[in-house]
Image (tube, rainbow, N blue to C red):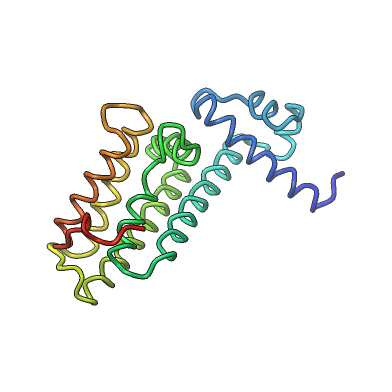
């Protein structure tokens, strides 16, 4: 029997492989064989470490949420001025393009929240974290006199996250909304909601 440390490493390896397989094939079409091939392991190894493939999928989703949240928090923490932090946070919430692996992965799981309770809880966690990040920036900016909020910070933050979700999907789906247009539209809303022309703010 594999030692505990080795088991942990193998499980992590399978999570990474499942992530790649889901992005390549889509969550609705990916098979255990696809995951095994991506991991360079036998099919039986997948079911040995994860008796239920749904458990593996949940770990993939939870890990993706943590990575996305950590990336955004690090970006926001890299600057001090609330106006710059708001701009950085908006930019970091959108896919870099149609092939942004992390965002593609998150969008694969989002529709499942309607049917799977665990996915719904994870999706709620992601949403709440993003709203909290925006609300903190908005409240700080208002306290320093940079922002004149036109609505409660929670409402503005919620709208910003909703806009990210919607526009991000268009970027991933390659519709007529480009990544640059999505960013400009969200910044336009944020400027109106904060009473601050963010397009004139110092850019990082």
Point out residue 199 in the picture as x, y percentages from the top left corner. 22, 54
Q: What is the number of callouts on the image?
A: 0
Q: Is residue 159 above or below residue 76?
A: above
At a point 41% along the width and 52% down the height, the residue shown is 126
Quadrant of the rendered image containing residue 149:
bottom left
Where is residue 44? Give x, y as percent.
75, 29
Q: Quadrant of the N terminus?
A: top right
x%, y% of residue 74? 47, 61
Q: Is residue 36 above or below residue 142?
A: above
Residue furthest toward the right? 1
- Res 194 quadrant in image: bottom left
Name the spot of residue 93 as percent of width and height, x first.
37, 49
For residue 71, side relative to residue 114 (left or right): right
Q: Between 21 and 27, which is closer to the camera in this rendering?
A: 21
Is 23 rendered above or below residue 190? above
Is 167 left or right of 126, judged from the image as shown?
A: left
* Residue drawn at 70 percent across, 44 percent down: 11
Query: Could you tell me which quadrant the C terminus lies in?
Result: bottom left
Q: Residue at x 17, y 62 (%)?
A: 196
Q: Is residue 110 left or right of residue 158?
A: right
| For residue 82, above or below residue 91 | below
Q: In percent of the image, x 26 and y 58: which residue is there?
A: 157
């Amino acid at each position: 029997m594999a030692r505990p440390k080795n088991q942990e490493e193998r499980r992590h390896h399978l999570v990474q492989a499942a992530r790649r397989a889901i992005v390549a094939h889509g969550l609705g079409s990916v098979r255990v064989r696809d995951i095994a091939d991506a991991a360079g392991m036998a099919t039986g190894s997948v079911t040995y470490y994860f008796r239920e493939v749904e458990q593996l999928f949940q770990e993939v989703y939870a890990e993706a949420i943590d990575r996305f949240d950590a990336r955004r928090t690090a970006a926001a923490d890299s600057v001090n001025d609330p106006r710059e932090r708001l701009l950085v946070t908006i930019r970091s919430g959108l896919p870099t393009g149609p092939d942004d692996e992390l965002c593609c992965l998150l969008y694969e799981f989002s529709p499942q929240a309607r049917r799977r309770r665990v996915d719904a809880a994870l999706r709620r966690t992601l949403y709440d974290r993003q709203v909290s990040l925006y609300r903190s920036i908005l409240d700080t900016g208002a306290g320093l006199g940079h922002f004149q909020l036109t609505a409660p910070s929670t409402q503005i933050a919620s709208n910003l996250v909703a806009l990210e979700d919607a526009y991000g999907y268009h970027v991933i789906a390659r519709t007529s909304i480009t990544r640059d247009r999505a960013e400009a539209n969200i910044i336009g809303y944020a400027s109106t909601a904060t009473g601050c022309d963010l397009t004139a703010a110092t850019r990082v």
